Amino acid sequence: MKENTLGFFDKVYEVVKQIPYGRVTSYGAIAKYLGASRSSRLVGYAMNNSHGKDVPAHRVVNSLGLLTGKHHFEGTNLMQQLLENEGITVVDNQIKDFKSVFWNPVEEL
């Protein structure tokens, strides 16, 4: 992987580590905060690469609140279980009341 991509991944991880317990954000919101609004897919790649890095990747979902990254977690429903352990309700792989638990780094950081 290119060095500049790895640097971007590190920036993504620093943002994700600041998502409060019981809150979620989206790939696009992180990309926008980092000044790379067209790079939400790259944020997703960073999340896929984050396992073992002490990053709460389960708190990052798509812009509709869908658990699109769930297949990158061990087990069948680990991403959903981690979110539910934080008090977030998930129905059919989508966060219920997404707007009420959404954390926007552009506004919060």
Image (tube, rainbow, N blue to C red):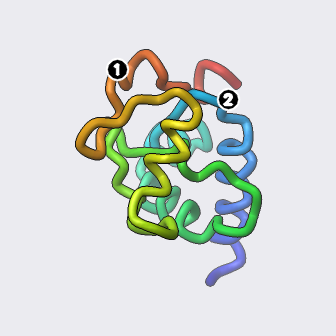
Q: Residue at x 48, y 22 (%)?
A: 101
Q: Which residue is mark 1?
A: 97
Spatial distance from mark 2 to mark 1, Cα to Cα? 17 Å
The three-letter amino acid code for the residue at tag 1 is: Asp
Indicate the position of residue 2 as horizontal and vertical percent values: 64, 81
**Three-letter amino acid code of the residue under disc 2:** Pro
Circle 1 crowding by C-alpha within 10 Å: few under 14, some 14–19, many from 20: few
Hey, which residue is sitting farthest top in the picture? 100
Residue lying at the far left of the rendered structure = 92
- Left or right, 12 with reference to 87: right
Mark with earlier residue (2, 1): 2
Secondary element at tag 2: loop
Which mark, residue 2? none
Q: Secondary structure at mark 1?
A: loop
Name the image quarter holding residue 15.
top right
Residue pointed to by mark 2: 20
In the orientation shown, which residue stands out farthest toward the bottom?
1
Give the camera-side residue of 31 and 20: 20
Position of residue 81 in the picture relative to residue 93 (left or right): right
- Whether residue 27 is visible to the viewer of this picture, yes or no, is no
